[in-house]
Amino acid sequence: MNAPNFDIFCRVVDNYGDAGVCWRLARQLATLGCGTRLWIDDLSVLARLAPEVDPAHELQSIQGVQIGAWHAAKHAQAPAQGVVIEAFACDLPPGYADTMATRDCLWINLEYLSAESWVEGCHGLPSLQASGIPKYFFFPGFSPATGGLLREGDLSIRRQQAQAQDRRTRLQALTGLPAHELPAPGLVMLLFCYPDAPWAGLQAALAQRDTPTWLLTPGAAPSGLCSQGSLRVLPIPFVPQARFDELLWCCDLNFVRGEDSLVRALWTGSPLVWQIYRQADDAHLDKLDAWLGRAHWPAPARALTRAWNRRDNAGVQQALPQALAADAWSAWQSRSREWSQELSGYADLAQNLLNFCQNRRRKS
Ligand code: TRH
């Protein structure tokens, strides 16, 4: 069966995650041989992730993907016998949606990532729409009963090849920083967090360590964070998404956030601290616990992650040295490697999505 053509619709709510997930998925579907169009309502956010994108152009082709401004989709037709993805329940442009019934399209709602177990029961379920077309719910997730996680086939080889080279050389090539500013021996960490993260607790804990820590802050660091004691804060440029993995591979511990950077940090096989996207009534804390329940990390790493997400400076200052103490650190490293390998053994999201669509097509 020929690979279907995909139209992906993305509305940027905030931050980089909506565009980041859709752009990564679009690039992967294109490498799987699917004609792929990405319709997005904020080209400037996409241009931050892919600097080749020109926000002034309504239609352009970058890295094998057709990119269109959202408003231009009203003149487009859904791909015949293809797949239309609305990311994170964004509504489709009205004129476009009207073309779907006559074009025999499959309609998918790509949901947010969650580690909660109910996701497994809802993944793949249809919901009949007013037009008579079913819309299928596709849930990314951490078990084979979900849609899985985005992962490129050559990722592990690329990581091994990169990590065979000296870390400072890689960082210099990636950031363009002069050699004298780059990390000397010591721990290297990435800090990609929301502005409300308890960075003061992190700063205090790292300042007091016996050995140096280099904290790389891509784009903008939280305001007020600075070098102190053993801590060296190193502002670096925001890197294109296609090179973001290389940055993670340079670090011993990655502080990440949201959705896409979490998944990328998982694939490094190194320890990470996740700041989950905040929701009303602290609903995100249950989601975080569901995720920690799958992680099986040593207790200090779990305590650190909870404190980080509760914006608890004192908790972070207490938990971080414990999580970095030799035994706990080595247990955290080995469980991170193990979980990463376990997750890599499952089919990845783009392939799962393609299989799901082709199976639905065979059944219809
Ligand atoms: O930016 P985010 O906080 O996005 C969030 C989440 O997706 C959240 O779930 C969603 O509800 C909200 O957006 C609307 O974090 P995320 O998902 O990690 O996206 C960041 C993207 O930025 C990711 O694709 C990696 C990329 N990135 C770079 O390309 N270069 C960089 O230097 C950095 C730091 C990030």
Image (spheres, helix red, strand yellow):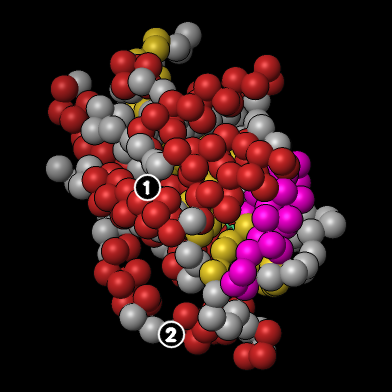
Identify the residue shown where x is 16% and y is 22%.
363
Element under disc 1: loop
Identify the residue shown where x is 36% and y is 42%.
149
| Amino acid at circle 1 | Leu
Judge the density around disc 1: few (<14), some (14-19), many (≥20) Cα neighbours within 10 Å: many
Disc 1 under 8 Å from ligand 1? The reply is no
Foreground pick, 215 / 58:
215
Return the x and y of residue 354 as percentages of the image width and height: 27, 40
Return the x and y of residue 196 as percentages of the image width and height: 75, 41
Return the x and y of residue 63 as percentages of the image width and height: 45, 65
Q: Which mark is residue 302?
A: none
Q: Which mark is residue 166?
A: 2
Return the x and y of residue 95 as percentages of the image width and height: 58, 28
Does residue 218 belong to the magenta stretch? no
Give the alpha-carbon distance from disc 2 to disc 1, as whole Å: 28 Å
Mark sitting earlier along the chain (2/1): 1
The residue singled out by tag 1 in the image is 150
Q: Nearer the viewer, mark 2 or mark 1?
A: 2
Identify the residue shown where x is 22% and y is 37%.
355
286 shown above or below 243: above
| Amino acid at circle 2 | Asp
Q: Which residues are the magenta region?
A: 192-212
